[in-house]
Image (spheres, rainbow, N blue to C red):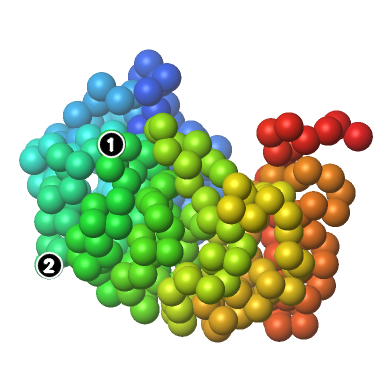
């Protein structure tokens, strides 16, 4: 009776390496049973169909499933957007949608989902964005279709970056991923821009408070860093509401890129730097 009429908010993690449905019971129990809303993560093999039959299937895996109401709020690693999948997703109270890939043929399907009356998505993450043509004209319809509820947008990758993100709506507070003073190879293309180009040409996005960036030691247009001040001035100019900068840093040496100097300057502007990952740039020494 303690579970009667409680709501279970489910996260679906689509895992191509998973052979069967896995229940993360620890994640469920740690939230306790005194709350009206419980949480659980299901790891699903990619062969499982995203359809109206999935929720009863998941409830049937639980010994107490008959007492619960299950709502799918998060889908991670989704690899296809067929008509059946779109129909199912539109009926779920989705808060977060993470796509393992998005092909050009699926653009219209995603836009129709985003513009549906029932959609109140808060987070959209797209990996392997339009690998054959990751251009601004492919991203523009998605930006136009984003619901006002969407506060986080992650795209890996669209290029050129200065044009691709020009249409980011004011509602987006968390944005990624920018590539500055680095060259990231993406399906036979190179993503990245020089610091001078970023400072001079990137659009102003006054709604963005949290920014994710890959920061490197140099770019073919600008092999040498002009100084941390140029980065800080560009960030403050283009992101006036910025409060947190999350970095993946490609290091050439302890001083390049000048993350420490940039962090000190950004702190004066009330901006925190969080370094999520550090790795050696190609060709860098190991000393």
> In the image, residue 94 lies at what x, y percent?
28, 56
Q: Nearer the viewer, residue 271 or 77?
A: 271
> In the image, residue 258 lies at what x, y percent?
79, 59
Find residue 132 and name its label: 1
Q: Is residue 145 above or below residue 181?
A: below
Q: Residue furthest front?
A: 221
Residue 164 visible in the displayed image: yes
Pointer 2: residues within 10 angstroms few (<14), some, or many (20+)? few
Write down the quadrant of residue 7 in the picture. Answer: bottom left
Q: Is residue 110 above or below residue 50?
A: below
Pointer 1: residues within 10 angstroms few (<14), some, or many (20+)? few
Residue beneath the point at 40% across and 55% down: 160
Q: Is residue 169 above or below residue 106?
A: below
Q: Looking at the image, do the residues carrying marks 2 and 1 touch, with CB atoms under 8 Å apart?
A: no
> In the image, residue 179 lies at what x, y percent?
55, 53
Point out the tag, 2 or 1, that comes first from the N-terminus: 2
Rendered-image quadrant of the C terminus: top right
Residue with the mark numbered 2: 117
Write down the quadrant of residue 122 in the picture. Answer: bottom left
Residue beneath the point at 82% across and 67% down: 261
Marks 2/1: CA–CA distance: 31 Å
């Amino acid at each position: 009776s303690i579970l009667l009429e409680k709501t279970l908010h489910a996260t679906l993690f689509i895992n191509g390496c998973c052979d069967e449905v896995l229940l993360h019971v620890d994640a469920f129990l740690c939230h306790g049973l005194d709350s009206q809303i419980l949480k659980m993560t299901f790891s699903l093999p990619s062969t499982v169909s995203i359809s109206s039959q999935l929720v009863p299937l998941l409830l049937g895996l639980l010994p107490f499933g008959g007492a619960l109401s299950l709502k799918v709020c998060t889908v991670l690693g989704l690899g296809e957007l067929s008509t059946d999948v779109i129909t199912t997703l539109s009926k779920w109270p989705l808060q977060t949608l993470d796509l393992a890939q998005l092909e050009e043929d699926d653009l219209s399907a995603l836009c129709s989902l985003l513009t549906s009356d029932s959609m109140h998505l808060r987070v959209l993450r797209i990996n392997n964005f339009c690998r054959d043509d990751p251009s601004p004209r492919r991203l523009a319809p998605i930006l136009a279709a984003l619901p006002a509820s969407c506060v986080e947008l992650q795209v890996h990758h669209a290029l050129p970056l200065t044009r691709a993100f020009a249409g980011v709506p004011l509602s987006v507070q968390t944005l990624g991923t920018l590539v500055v003073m680095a060259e990231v190879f993406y399906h036979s293309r190179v993503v990245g821009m020089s610091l001078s180009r970023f400072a001079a040409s990137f659009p102003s996005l006054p709604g963005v408070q949290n920014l994710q960036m890959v920061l490197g030691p140099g770019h073919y247009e600008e092999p040498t860093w002009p100084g941390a001040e140029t980065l800080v001035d560009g960030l403050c100019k283009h992101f006036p509401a910025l409060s947190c900068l999350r970095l993946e840093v490609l290091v050439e040496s302890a001083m390049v890129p000048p993350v420490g100097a940039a962090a000190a300057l950004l702190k004066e502007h009330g901006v925190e730097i969080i370094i999520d990952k550090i790795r050696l740039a190609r060709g860098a020494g190991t000393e």
